[in-house]
Amino acid sequence: MRFHSLLSFAIPFFFWTLAGATSWGFDDATVVVHGKKAGVGGGAKEKLVENKALPEPVVLGAADTLKLLLTATEGKKARRPHQAFLLLREPKSGLDTSFPLSVKESGKGKLELSHKDLPTQFLTEPRTLSASLIIASFGSSTPYRSPAFDLKIELDPSAPPPLVEKPLRYGKLPEIHHTFKADPKSPPKIITVIFTAAVLAALPSLFFGWLSLGANLNHTSKAFGSSPLSHGAFFCSILAMEGIFFMYYTSWNLFQTLPAAAIVGLVAFLSGSRALREVQERRLAGLR
């Protein structure tokens, strides 16, 4: 008794579910091919039926325009779907592309197609494409997808074939070998010799100028006696700085030169300040 009660409830529910299930489709669908010289209402016209492809292919010439008209339906009511497009597929290569229909709120959709809209790969030679209609939207309604017709592409024999660009493929690239700029080299030796000779030749003139201005070498022992550390460190720091410049010119780089120059410069500043203070004391004492 309980089983019959359950069965009497389940059977009506089952049929109610089937009755409530809807699917997408179309109505009043036609495909028209207009030639370049065809007038209004001219051109080949075929009527499309749901789930049934046309027996003969639709021919699209180089100067023709294909026009697809339909009314999308959900169940038996005309509605605007979320997606409605024509899918063209080349059976041999599997290459496909889609063209969306322009659909109004009333469900009426339209698509115009010509050679300029097709991918270049479809126009390299005469071929027949499979055209399918796809209509779908949000909700529980079953989407519609079914072949509608075959599209035969005819080319203009007098026109040159289009150039097909090689598609971009992502993958492993050849190893990159970086070529870094070579380290800067020293000037030619002849230039170095010339400038070194010019500096050495100027030293006698420098000593002569010191003597003519009243330089007194007799105070050397007194200066080193009063402040030997500062005078010695200052003189050695000058020689060390010249040595650093020589090393930078011959072999060192900038990162080796700067730390050494900073240390020697600090020693020269501290020792030079103390040495000049000792010289000032002698000048104030009247020693020249």
Image (cartoon, rainbow, N blue to C red):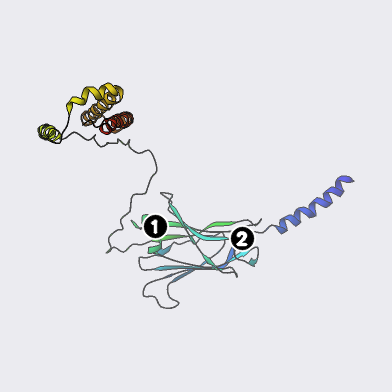
Q: Residue at x 61, y 60 (%)?
A: 24
> Where's residue 97, x and y in %?
45, 55
Give the mark, 2 or 1, whose residue is nearer the N terminus.
2
Which label lies toward us, 2 or 1?
1
Report whether residue 190 is seen: no
Apparent side of residue 219 relative to residue 99 in the rendered image (left or right) = left
Apparent side of residue 245 relative to residue 48 in the rendered image (left or right) = left
Mark 2 vs 1: CB contact within 8 A: no
Name the residue tied to disc 2.
Answer: 24
> Where's residue 78, x and y in %?
62, 68
Q: Residue at x 39, y 43 (%)?
A: 170
Taking depth in this image into account, of 230 and 123 the one nearest to the observer is 230
Kind of element beneath mark 1: loop
Q: Residue furthest right?
A: 1
Apparent side of residue 72 relative to residue 276 in the rendered image (left or right) = right
> Where's residue 200, x and y in %?
11, 31
Pick the quarter of the image with the C terminus. Answer: top left
Name the residue tied to disc 1.
Answer: 119
Report the amino acid beneath label 1: Pro
